[in-house]
Structures are given as structure tokens and as C-alpha cells.
Image (tube, rainbow, N blue to C red):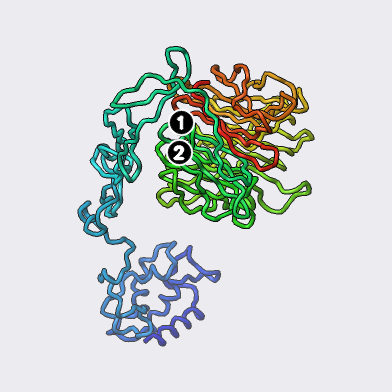
Amino acid sequence: MRTRLLAVLFVASAAAAPGGCSSGSSAMPDGTGPADVMCNQCGDVEGADETAVGDVMCNQCGDIEPDDGLVPDLVPDVPTDTAGDVPPDLLPDVPPDVEPDVAEDVPSDVPEPECEDADDCVAAFGAPLLCMEWDCHQGICEQVPADLGLPCDDLEVCTLDDVCDGEGFCNGTWDACDDADVCTVDSCDMGVGCSYSPEGPKACVDDDGKAGFSACKDNAWLPCKAVGPCELAVNTNDTGTVNPFIFPAREGNFYVSYVASEDGGGNLKLAWVDPITCSTVQGPFTVNDVPGGVYYWGNQWALSDGTGNFYAVWEAKSGLGDIKFSTSESGLEFSPSVEVVSTSDNGVYPSMAILSPGKPVIAWTGYIGAPNPKGFSYDAFVSTNPNVFGGGMFAPGIQVAATEIQDDSTAVAVDAKGTIYVAWESFQDGTDEGGNVYVAKSTDGGLTFSPKVRVNDVPGKANVGISTFIAWGGDRLYVVWSDTRTDPEGDVYIDSAPDGAAFGQDVKVNDDGYRYQEDPSVVVADGTNCPGTVYVVGQDMRSNKSYDIYGTRSTDKGNTFEANKVVHQSTDGDQMNPAIGVDYNCVVGVAWRDDTGNEKFNVKAALLPSW
């Protein structure tokens, strides 16, 4: 049927003539249109019992509109029962196994919800973190901060009434451990608990105006007992000692640290001294764990955080590392040392401050990379440790500034808000002068530092020593140095800044301009009877015979200073490289290197109940 119909159509299209049922506007060039061709062939369609396409066309000739010349319009109704007459190859290719109503064959990207409520989250993932709670959000388990004030336990024995702060942290009130006894120092040690140590003697002035101490007994302070200035030799070896440091210890004592020439190198020594008996009450004992492992001429610091913890840092002997650090919770036995330097290629001139108990910050001078044409580019570096007593590690060192060619003598201090201040001396800072003192600060715990600021007013004339030359006290930062602006042999100057950035006008400290005044050290008191008092000492050759240790103080934030005075009783040899400390009772301690004339130095200390 299909072949015959196609043949008929072909013949019709080739032999059509004008006439029949023509539709005018749809005519071909010879006057015939598609409908004319079809209608002229109606008599050729066979099969009376079959309804053919041709029959349909002919029956519709009279219905063709003038503009209707498309073949599909000529086949409006094909009986559905003719489908069986169509050859199989003309049927559409519909896959027999496709069943569109089967939903499971269609993939879905919507995940199954993991919860309907918070209880489902607990069952699936367990209890939330401390001060957090589970929340089922759109079918997903999330931890969100618990409500403010929810009771919690931070597992610290020194905190009381712990509650959640609404931000996901558990905080409590630090236990004051008050035993109502004025003769004890009450404190709470992290992870340990309350401790009550005897209150040490306090500095006082008796009825005759003489300086002395008052002892505490039976919950009361006894009358003031006059005591004169104390001076004693600290070291017990006779092979040489250098670079002393002094700092208040517990129970009214001071401790003095120094480097002794021993064991084929140097050892860091520590001794406790009592200003009342003017004697050594503990030590000297060795801090470093490798005998002879300290660089003899290197710098060292030893501090206490006021709660009984001790920290020591020193420059190691060549081949044993750069900067070593150790701690003690008793001040008698120290932990094995650890290396601090982790970024620079070298480490010299270490210094240290304490952010809070267990959190030291260490500064040093080091360099990175190959030497430049003028030598290695030494710069100031800083590293912090978040918890030395809990296994904390020192962070990689941060380079404070990298714009000078040669830096020296780095020092560090912190304020009550935790701001870190670093000072350093630059000999080659891109100018012909060299010899400037710079300061930069960090308000994010030592991660980044502000741009450096120069402290000294007159550029190129500054020089500092190896002792403390930076200190925070009261409400400002103080920096001291030796300066040759008016004297080629040097004078001592000081400057300060309430924000550690905007320094004022330099103030000359020494009241004699003859010969050398240099290597200064500074400390600021915070005791009840001497808050904000600034003390400065330095080595001084005004006698034109030998170096002596002179000191002075300022009670007006470093604007003016009292008359200088000798702080020691020794009269022979040189007294050099002083360090100074002051305790809460306003007792001032000064330590120095004492030259007996044979290069086998001693370390001596003076303890001054009243300045």
C-alpha cells in the first residue's frame, strides 16, 4: 500500500494539468497547486474498502481555503484503526522498557536529614563541647554557644563559679585564696590550688627617719627596725663572672643571676639574697642543664612572675643552639632547657618579659639569609609561649623590623594590657650616622608589630649596653641609653611614651658630664609607697680613676632626676655593667660586675631599703 501510494503521488506531481479543484493563491508557476494535483488523482486510488490518504484528500477538495496549501492541513482525521496497516519500520522507536511512572528510577540530590531535633544530634554525635549545645538546623546538626550564665566547669582549680559566657567559653572568678592573715602572701597556682607563703619584710622608715624593715608576726606588722644599705659578693667561684641580672624573688628576697666561667665554657648561676641579713640564703646553683653550655660573654635574663614561677633565658655556647630557655616553679630546680630560636639563623642578646603566669615573651637579635655587602643584616625577633608549664611550645620567631643593616642589644617589656614593646639599637640603619634606638609594639600577642619609631632626638649618637634599657611602669614606656651628642665619651639619656610610640624630648640623667657615663639600666616601681618612681643606674668614670656605679631616681615620670649617688661601698677596681630591680616594698637592688684587677671578675649586689 505504501509503495503504490508513493508511486501514484509521484506520477501525479509530474503529470498534473490545469483544472480540477484548484485553490488559486497556492498555485504553482504553471497554475497548479498541491490540492489540484491530489484531486486529479482521486480516480486512481484503489481499494473501496480501504481509506487511503488519497481518498481523504479528494473528499476535502472543496474545503481547502485559498491560502491553505500545506499537506498536513489536508489530512485532518486519520482513523486510529489504520495503525495496524502501517509497516513496523514507520512506527516511532519507543523503548519498550521505559516506564515513566516508576519514581525510583529518577536520581535525587536531596540528602536525607540527619536529625529532627537536638536529641537526634546527641544520639548521633554524643555530647557537645563545653559551653556549646546541639541545634538541629534544617535537618543538619550544628553546635551553637550555650546560654549565658549556664553553669560549667573549666577544670581549673583556681577558678570559682564557672559559667558559660554566651560565646562558647567557660569562665570563672579567680580564687583570691584569702586566709585573712596579713602575714601571708595568698595566691592560687594554676592546676595546683591555693598557697600561703609567709609575707617578707617590708621597707619602712623608723621614727628617727632611718630606713629599715618591718617584719610581720601573729597577723600584725611589727615596728620598723632601721637597717643600713647592704652589699655582698654573690659568686663563690674565683674563675670569673660577668653579665649580672637582679630581680625581686619571694619572701622579701632578691635573686641575682650571672654567668660564671666553668666547665670549659659558662654556666648560668642563680642565688637568692636577703636584704635584712645581707646574706645569700639560696645558691648559687646552676640553671643550665648542659655543663659549660652558656656563652660566657652572652646576655642572660632571669625573672619571676610574682606568683612563685621563675623563668631563665640565655645565649648558648657555640654549637649548642642559639637562645635557651628554662623554667622553675620553686626557683631552686629548673626544667631541661629548650631552644627558642626557630626562625632566624642566629640568636644573640636575649631578653625576656612575662605576659602573664606561664606566658613568657622573648626577644633577641638574629638574621635571615645570606650576608649583604655590609655583613649580615641583624634584626630584632620575638617569640611567645602560651603555656610553658603545660607543655606549650615557642611560636616561630617574628621579625619585628627589617629596614636596618645591623641591629644590636634587643630588649622587651609588656604593659598591663598585654601589649608587647621591643626596643633595639641600630648601628647601621641606612644613614651615615648609625647609632639609633628604635621601638615597635604589638597589640596581638606578638603576631604583628607596628612600624618602628625612633626614640632618640639626635640621630646617630645613641648607644646602649647589655642590661635592661627598656621598662614599662605606671602608664608609660621608658627607654635609656648612652649618647654622645654633647660629650664624645657619653652621657645617659632617657625618654618615655604613654603609648610606646609618641616619644617626647630626651632627658639627660647624669648630673656630671666628665668622662664616661654609659651602659644604663632602668626599672619602674609599682609598690604602694613608690608607684611610678623611675630608677636608673649606669657605670660612671667621673672620678677619672675607675668606673663606679651611680644611680638616681625620678618621681615625676622621668622629667627630672635627683642628684646622682654611688650605690656601692667598694672602692677598688672597676664596677661595671649594672642591672637594677625594685620590689613591691620599694627596696631597690643593684648588681654589677666587680673588677678585682686581674680579669677574674666577681658579681656583687647592693640592697637599698630606702632610696
Side (left or right) of 407 relative to 93: right
C-alpha span from label 2 to label 1: 9 Å
Which residue position holds label 2? 281
Check the image and report above or below for 317 versus 411: below
Badge 2 vs badge 1, beta-carbon distance below 8 Å? yes
Side (left or right) of 151 relative to 367: left
Residue 94: quarter of image: bottom left
Mark 2: few, some, or many residues within 10 Å (few <14, many ≥20)? some
Residue 264: quarter of image: bottom right
Residue 315 visible in the picture = yes
Whole-percent x and y of residue 345? 64, 53
Residue drawn where x is 26% and y is 68% of the image: 103
Whole-percent x and y of residue 464? 67, 33
Mark 1: few, some, or many residues within 10 Å (few <14, many ≥20)? few
Whole-percent x and y of residue 67? 44, 62
Task: Say which of 437 and 195 sits in front.
Answer: 195
Q: Residue furthest top?
A: 208
Residue drawn where x is 34% and y is 63% of the image: 109
Residue drawn where x is 68% and y is 53% of the image: 369
Side (left or right) of 487 relative to 279: right
Side (left or right) of 383 relative to 577: left
Task: Say which of 249 and 572 sits in front.
Answer: 572
Which residue position holds label 1? 277
Residue drawn where x is 42% and y is 41% of the image: 309
The three-letter code of the residue at mark 2 reads: Val
The three-letter code of the residue at mark 1 reads: Thr
Task: Say which of 502 and 481 sits in front.
Answer: 481
Mark drawn on residue 129: none
Question: Which quadrant holds the N terminus?
Answer: bottom left
Considering the numbered disc 2 on the image, is that residue within a helix, a strand or a loop?
strand
Considering the numbered disc 1 on the image, is that residue within a helix, a strand or a loop?
loop
